[in-house]
């Protein structure tokens, strides 16, 4: 582990020798992640991108991509585009990336079960803002908005998410 890695425990995230409170999935930490279990998968995951709401926040880094009005994330294991960004209209199970609430104003993408998704192994594990302190996620990592804003531009291409 390096200081530029995002290291997650059940109560905090460590990055650049600083500790940040975080939320994990309501299903706890898991070595056997499955679609819909609400768990955060243990292991080492690459950071593969950053998404942001250009109408709400400034572009955090040069590699960040804006979330467009029709952007969705497929979470339907029966579909060939499972665990991929898709566009509306999309009749299968999905999650809106351009939400009315601020949860996905800034999103760090990991390579959990991506790009070649295994059916039912679980869709995207994002790092995004938390709903409120201590409130669990659906499996993602939740951070205070100010902490997420501080961390994102400091990520390096070799930074990883390590869930202990």
Image (spheres, grey):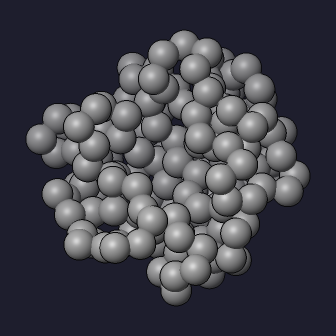
56 with respect to 82 (left or right): left
- In the displayed image of the protein, which residue is found farthest to the front? 91
> Quick one: 36 or 153, which is closer to the camera?
36
Q: Residue at x 23, y 37 (%)?
A: 100
Residue at 20% across / 63% down in the picture? Answer: 70
Q: How many marks?
A: 0
Task: From the viewer's perspective, tell me whether residue 5 is left or right of residue 128.
Answer: right
Q: Position of residue 7 (x, y in %)?
A: 72, 36
64 vs 30, left or right, is: left
Task: Work out whether residue 148 or residue 114 is closer to the camera in this orientation and state it.
Answer: 114
Residue at horizontal 52 percent and vertical 64 percent from the top: 75
> Given the current orientation, which residue lies at the most extreme bottom position?
80
Q: Vertical placement of 41 versus 60: above or below?
A: below
Query: Could you say where residue 79 lies in the image, as x and y percent from the top left?
Result: 52, 82
Classify 129 as above or below 124.
above
Quarter of the rendering containing residue 34: bottom right
**In-front residue for pair 150/55:** 55
From this view, report whether residue 131 is shown above or below residue 27.
above
Is 65 situated left or right of 81 in this image? left
Q: Residue furthest right?
A: 31
Residue 34 visible at all: yes
Quarter of the image for the N terminus: give it.
top right
Quadrant location, the C terminus: top right
- Above or below, comparing residue 151 to residue 139 in the picture: above
Q: Position of residue 111 (x, y in %)?
A: 60, 63
Residue 11 is drawn in which quadrant?
A: top right
Residue 158, position as x, y percentages in the image: 60, 56
- Inspect this view and state whether residue 157 appears: no
């Amino acid at each position: 582990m390096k200081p530029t890695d995002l290291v997650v425990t059940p109560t905090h995230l460590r990055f650049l020798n600083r500790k940040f409170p975080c939320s994990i999935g309501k299903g706890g930490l898991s070595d056997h992640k499955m679609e819909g279990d609400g768990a955060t998968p243990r292991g080492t995951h690459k950071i593969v991108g950053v998404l942001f709401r250009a109408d709400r926040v400034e572009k955090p880094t040069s590699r960040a991509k804006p979330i467009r009005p029709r952007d969705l994330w497929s979470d339907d294991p029966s579909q060939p585009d499972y665990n991929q960004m898709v566009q509306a209209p999309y009749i299968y199970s999905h999650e809106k990336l351009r939400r009315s609430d601020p949860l996905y104003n800034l999103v760090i993408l990991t390579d959990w079960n991506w790009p070649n998704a295994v059916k039912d192994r679980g869709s995207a594990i994002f790092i995004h803002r938390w709903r409120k302190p201590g409130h669990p996620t659906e499996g993602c990592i939740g951070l205070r908005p100010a902490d997420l804003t501080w961390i994102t531009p400091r990520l390096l291409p070799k930074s990883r998410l390590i869930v202990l």
